[in-house]
Amino acid sequence: MTTLPEGHNAIGVKWIFKTKRNAEGEIKKHKARLVAKGYKQQYGVDYEDVFAPVARIKTVRLMISLAAQKRWKIF
């Protein structure tokens, strides 16, 4: 949680769940994604910015290896 700048509102999110099936109709995997409720945005205020809520695993591994090499603290 964070404090927002004065005059700005947080945009809500919603979880979308989907079940993937193979050709025989058997469940192959379950998928979930988090999407922003874009209809709450205001043009000129928060309409142009895009934020990704997750990092790629390659990026996380890179940061951990850099921290290990440089002896940085990870928290």
Image (tube, helix red, strand yellow):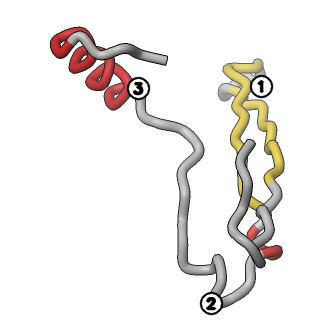
In the structure shown, which secondary structural element does the residue marked by tag 2 occupy? loop
Q: Quadrant of the N terminus?
A: top right
Query: In x, y percent, where is residue 75?
Result: 49, 18
The span from disc 1 to disc 2 (Cα, nearest Å) is 46 Å
Residue that sits furthest to the left in the current view: 69
Residue 15, located in which quarter of the rendered image?
A: top right
Which of the two discs, 1 and 2, labels the residue nearer the N terminus?
1
| Type of the residue with mark 1 | Gly
Say whether disc 2 or disc 3 marks the residue closer to the N-terminus: 2
Tell me if mark 1 has few (under 14), some (14-19) or many (20+) residues whose alpha carbon lies within 10 angstroms of its own.
few
The residue tagged 3 is 57
User: Of the residues shown, which amino acid type is indicated by label 2?
Assistant: Gly
Q: At 54% across and 71% down in the image, what residue appears?
A: 49
Q: Quadrant of residue 70?
A: top left
Q: Position of residue 66 (x, y in %)?
A: 22, 20
Task: For marks 1 and 3, give the CA distance.
Answer: 31 Å
